[in-house]
Amino acid sequence: MEDYRQAATAIRNVSAEFTAVLPRILKPGESKFLHKIADLKPDAVLARNLEELAFFRERHIPVIVDFSLNVINDLAFYQMLDWGAERVTFGLDVNEQQMRNLLQHVPPERVEQVVIGRVPLFTMEHCLWQTQFLKPGEPCQKLCREQPLQIEDRYGALHTVRADIFCRNIVERSEPIESQPLAAHLRIEWDDRMNEQRVAEILDQAFARK
Ligand SMILES: [Zn+2]
C-alpha cells in the first residue's frame, strides 16, 4: 500500500494524473484494500476484474477496464460502458484487423489501447522470492516487489516475474505486446478520436535465475 501512496505523491508533484493500477486477482475479504486506494483519491483506476469496476463506479472514480476482462466484441464493450467504465481496453485476442472493424462500431474515444506492455502468462499464489531466497516461514515483506526476478524457460527465453500487493506472482511473457510497431500510426491511421494509449512497459534490470 505504501508503494501506491508514494507513487501518488510523486505523480502529483509533477502535476500529472494519478491512475491506480489495481491487482488482477481480488479474493473475498480483500476488498478493504480498495478502500485504501479510494482514500488516495486517484484520478482514475485501471480495473482488472468486475469487483474493482463496481467498487470505483459507486464512488464516482473513473474506471478504465483492462484487457483482463476480455472485451472482444461491441456487445461486451457496451456492457462495460453500461456498468460505468470510462474507457475499455480490448482483450489481447483482438488482432489488428478485428480492432479496425470494432472501431467502426464503438466510440473510439472510449477505447484505451496498450502500445507497449507485457502479456501475463499466469498468476499464482506461490511467492518465488519467499521460496527461493528466504527461510521457510520468513516473510518476504517488500523483497518481492523491490528485487527484480526473471525465470528462464527451456528455450532460453526470460520471463519477468512480478509480485502484486498480496504477494501473488505474475509471470509475464518475454515477448512484449505487439501493437508497438503500430504506435506511431495509431492516431492518424486508426481514428483521431482514439487518443488514449497506455505504455505499460517497466524497464527490467532483472537477473535471471534458472
Ligand atoms: Zn512475496
Image (cartoon, helix red, strand yellow):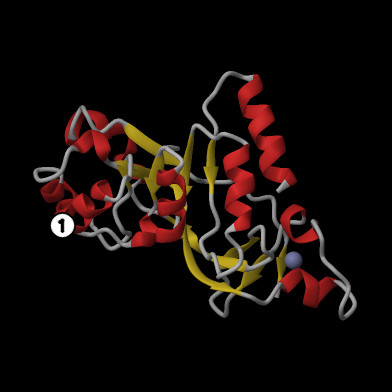
Q: Position of residue 104 (x, y in %)?
A: 9, 43
Q: Position of residue 79 (x, y in %)?
A: 22, 54
- Disc 1 target residue: 75
Q: Quadrant of residue 76?
A: bottom left
Residue occupying the point 68% across, 28% down: 10
User: In the displayed structure, would residue 31 be above or below residue 198?
Assistant: below
Is the residue indicated by label 1 positioned so its CB lies within 8 Å of ligand 1? no
Give, as a three-letter code, the residue at label 1. Answer: Leu
Q: Does residue 196 appear to the left or right of 163 in the view shown? A: left
Q: Does residue 9 appear to the left or right of 44 in the view shown? A: right
Compare residues 181 and 76 and report the one nearer the observer: 76
Q: Residues within 10 Å of mark 1 (few under 14, many from 20)?
A: few
Q: Position of residue 190 (x, y in %)?
A: 18, 36
Q: Quadrant of residue 153?
A: bottom right
Q: Does residue 38 appear to the left or right of 73 in the view shown? A: right
**Residue 203 visible at all:** no
**Residue 94 visible at all:** yes
Picture quarter with the C terminus: bottom right
Q: Quadrant of residue 192?
A: top left
Residue occupying the point 60% across, 48% down: 35
As helix, strand or loop, the secondary structure at mark 1 comes to helix
Residue at far front of view: 58
Q: How many marks?
A: 1
Residue occupying the point 41% across, 53% down: 54
Residue occupying the point 15% across, 44% down: 106
User: In the displayed structure, would residue 136 be above or below residue 26?
Assistant: below
Q: Position of residue 125 (x, y in %)?
A: 63, 75
Q: Does residue 143 appear to the left or right of 25 in the view shown? A: right
Q: Quadrant of ligand 1?
A: bottom right
